[in-house]
Image (cartoon, rainbow, N blue to C red):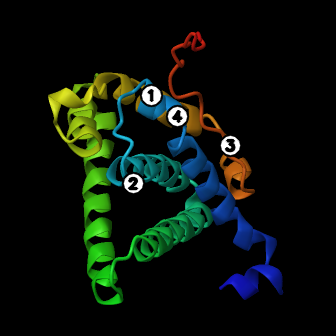
Amino acid sequence: MIWKRFFGADSRDEVPYQLYGAAVRQARSPAFYLDGGVPDTVEGRFEMVALHAWLLLRRLREGGEAGKAVGQKVFDILFDDMDQTLREMGVGDLSVGKKIKALASSFYGRMQAYDSGLQASGDELLAVALSRNVYGENPETGGQPERLAAYVRRADRDLHGQAIAEMLAGRVVFGAPFQSIEMAPDTI
């Protein structure tokens, strides 16, 4: 696959990687972890990547056949990335496939829960789904599912405001997660 990127790759092949890269960069924004209380763990980071991939896929679904095709490639890249990450973490070859299958199943469940949450009036249903998936329903985590739900609703609205043609060209903009709390410099 890597050779295809260097020799004879169509520029359209890069679009899903550009979109997935934008989703991952947004998911890694320190504000989610520092200000939003998302656990800075492998699981917490997976949840944020999955959340942003879902937001992207949600918008691409509405882009006709071209949008759906790009969305499928983004989905494939997401799970190729998860496969590689599991292998780098030392998960044995024989169990990687089972773990990827379980991750894909849980991803579909999250998509349904988040879609239902966005379709409901208010953020309560969405916040419950985010609490369960992102924060693990642990009140001691300092998580802020209501704040994250408001961000998700705003991000979804912003993505729907972007032209699908721009996305199909590999350009997507995610808005600012939260306003970071300014920290005073350490005094010595």
Q: Mark 2 Cα within 10 Å, few/some/many (few <14, many 20+)?
A: some
Q: Which percent across, then down, holds residue 165?
A: 72, 51
| Distance from the alpha carbon under mark 3 to that under mark 1 | 31 Å
- Residue at 44% x, 28% y is 34
| Distance from the alpha carbon under mark 3 to that under mark 4 | 27 Å
SS for tag 3? loop
- Residue at 39% x, 54% y is 46
Q: Quadrant of the N terminus?
A: bottom right
Q: Depth-wise, is mark 3 or mark 1 nearer the camera?
A: 1
Which residue, given by chain and number where applicable, does mark 4 sit on? 30
SS for tag 1? helix
Is residue 168 depicted above or below 89 in this figure?
A: above
Give the camera-side residue of 96 and 187: 187
Earlier residue among tags 3 and 1: 1
Which residue, given by chain and number where applicable, does mark 1 sit on? 34
Earlier residue among tags 2 and 1: 1
- Residue at 33% x, 84% y is 92
